[in-house]
Image (cartoon, rainbow, N blue to C red):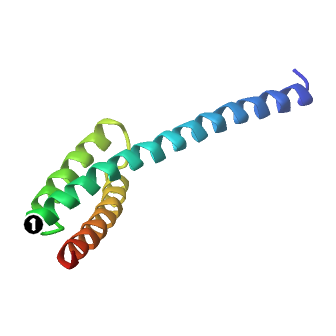
Amino acid sequence: MSTSETEDSVHAELTRLRESIDNIDAAVVHMLAERFKCTQQVGHLKARHHLPPADPAREARQIARLRQLAESANLDPAFAEKLLNFIIAEVIRHHETIAGGARTT
């Protein structure tokens, strides 16, 4: 195989892998959007029933669960926990906003 053919082969494989990454990124974004639709509903339910925006016990269970899932998927559990903590913080922020709006209406 010539250098040119090798470079073409490498470029084609790189393109194929990057297309897969792009598809996965799109799926992740859509899954997060669906997750946030559900958590918005949770926020409205909590606000209607005067429940606190955060649920530390639930959050701890979810973190433990996600760490186990990450381990079984050969993903760094610490990374998975950081990601979930970031998502949880955003969800709580949304719930606080919803609760604030529910108090003023």
Q: Locate residue 11, reporting x and y percent.
A: 78, 34
Query: Residue at left 16%, top 66%?
Result: 47
Residue 25 to residue 55: above or below: above
Q: Is residue 58 left or right of residue 21?
A: left
Q: Quadrant of residue 59?
A: bottom left
Q: Locate residue 95, reporting x and y percent.
A: 25, 66
Query: Residue at left 13%, top 63%?
Result: 48
Query: Residue at left 41%, top 49%?
Result: 33
Viewer-closest of 56 and 17: 56
Q: Quadrant of residue 93?
A: bottom left
Viewer-closest of 46 and 80: 46
Q: Is residue 55 visible?
A: no
Q: Locate residue 69, reporting x and y percent.
A: 27, 40
Q: Is residue 15 visible?
A: yes
Q: Is residue 71 left or right of residue 15?
A: left
Quarter holding the N terminus is top right
Residue 8 to residue 56: above or below: above
Viewer-closest of 84 and 77: 84
Which residue does the numbered mark 1 point to in the structure image? 51
Disc 1 crowd rating (10 Å Cα; few below 14, some 14-19, many 20+) is: some
Q: Secondary structure at mark 1?
A: loop
Quarter holding the C terminus is bottom left
Q: Residue furthest front?
A: 105
Residue 3 to residue 32: above or below: above
Q: Is residue 97 left or right of residue 79?
A: left
Give the residue type at disc 1.
Leu
